[in-house]
Amino acid sequence: MKRPSMTLPAHVPVLIAGGGPVGLTLSALLSAQGIANLVIEADEGYCSGSRAICMSRRSQEILGWAGADKALVDKGLSWVGGRSYWRHNEVLQFQMPSEPTQRYAPMVNIQQFYVEEFAHRAAQSGAKPAQVQWASRVSAVKPGDGGVEVEVITPEGLQTVRADWLVACDGGRSTVREQLGLQLEGTQYDGKYVIVDVVQKTRRAVERLAWFDPPSNPGSTILMHRQPDDVWRIDYQIRDDEDPLEAVKPENVLPRVQSHLAMIGEDEPWEPLWISIYNAKCLTLPSYRHGRVMFAGDAAHLVPIFGVRGLNSGLDDAGNLAWKLARVVRGQSPHTLLDSYSIERVHATRENIAYGAKSTEFMAPPNFAYKLMREATLRLAEGDAQVRSLINPRQSTPITYVGSPLNAVATDGWSHDMAAPGSPAPEALLQDGQGAFHLSSRFGRDFLVLAFGPAGRHAPTLHGLEVLTIDPAMDVHGQAWQRYGLSGAQDAALVLVRPDGYVMGRWHGHDPAPLLKSLTTTGVFA
């Protein structure tokens, strides 16, 4: 349905080019922080087809900061593991780390258009509701020292908006990237996958399913995921000599789908909803900040779908950038804070690409030698449990920001480095006078100081910082003390958690001086 157009404002603090899931999530996070923003989207509404479908625990948490998590969890289908088959035989059953006390499931399957809808709703209900201009596209970008002049083609004609900051979330064919003369660097694989959504009722468990050289489609690799609304998402590899334009025609797609559904015993009536094609890319910009123009999501990097690091890494971009940009817009931090966004997220992309490349080379071998190695691995995996780990798709997990300029100087005397500076802050289920709560529910707003100490010991009051006192009685499962590296219930420590749920630093005792100094020396505070 076509959305109503509007006259664009002459000036906005933040303009977001691209109203896909990354752009709308960034918009919602900025709105929650009270930052006015404008989203420009070329389509008339949310996307069609399933597209990115697997939402990690970290992505659910990020959407929760904007108030979009409940709708996603209620609608989505959660899962914790999967199976892989070689021909007829099961060669792998894997489980992702999960426990009953976790706040979110390791993964939730849901179509991308639902993510866009829920993020958009959140952006409309934030402290500063966002404006979204549909059926419009950025046509020209003119950066300057004090802002960016952006020309936008709308249904009413060409309009110009001056933005203090421009964030490019406009996808793999980014107009903003082209306007700045920037190019992605890396590798593109030749192997292509047809992607099909079909409606069919099933009683199968929700899990990630993969087949290598299945009898239904010999020589191919097939992935399957259940989605809401009785939808199967099916990805299958086509031969190198097949014409991609021919491969996506229904008369060529539907027989292959029918053959596979019949092979696995899914005999309920079905019909196709959406067909597309995909090939793996390992590409990134060397920097995600160019003056007052920032890049996020597919505009910044293209990561293979295997291991579901594409959209999830884009939402991590939004989670990392939103609080930093909000502080800069409010004048609380210098512009140089935004350099850390690029440093951290380029590092994360290179890690994701390294994992994604390994998965791609196994799922879609780029040459004969890789095909031989894969077949040998699959043969051995039938009878050797140790070999099966080589088939594990290694699903998306949060990246540790090693070497980040925001990391406080590490201190000694901790039992482990799980909560070292630059690490994702560990989850813990705690108990206070109001009842049980997850520690992660306190992330996403502002800096949070975790004050660990013996019962009855008072933590310091820190002006401008939220302090959460954690004594042993609150840590009913012993998770917080153990996961943050404290050795005993009599230990006292301060842990500084960034608004995006990453540990910035940790110090023994309750002296706030080194903590406050780190906020200044790292350039977070102006």
Image (tube, rainbow, N blue to C red):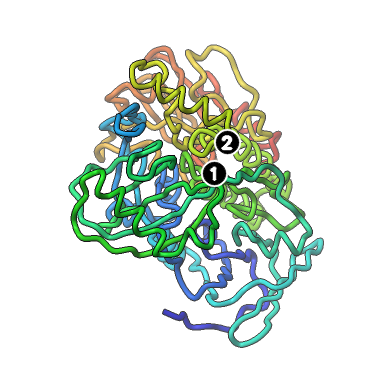
Please, what secondary structure does the residue beneath circle 1 have?
A: loop
Left or right, residue 207 beside residue 340: left
Relative depth, front residue between 408 and 143: 143
Please, what secondary structure does the residue beneath circle 2 have?
A: helix
Left or right, residue 67 beside residue 320: left
Task: Residue at the far right: name it.
Answer: 145
* Quarter the N terminus occupies: bottom left
Above or below residue 390? Residue 199 is below
Give the residue displayed 36% in from the left and 53% down from the top: 256
Which residue is identified by label 2?
Answer: 357
Left or right, residue 323 beside residue 95: right
> Residue 454, position in %: x, y?
38, 19
Give the residue displayed 54% in from the left and 12% down from the top: 413
Above or below residue 152? Residue 124 is above
Give the residue displayed 19% in from the left and 53% down from the top: 267
Kind of residue indicated by mark 2 = Ala
Task: Residue at the far bottom: name it.
Answer: 156
Relative depth, front residue between 92 and 205: 92
Q: Do the numbered discs 1 and 2 sit on residues whose CB atoms are within 8 Å?
A: yes
Which residue is identified by label 1?
Answer: 304
> Residue 364, position in %: x, y?
51, 39
> How crowded is the residue under tag 1: few (<14 C-alpha within 10 Å), some, or many (20+)?
many
Relative depth, front residue between 139 and 209: 209
Kind of residue indicated by mark 1 = Pro
Give the residue displayed 51% in from the left and 23% down from the top: 510
Answer yes or no: is residue 517 visible.
no
> Residue 153, position in %: x, y?
65, 79
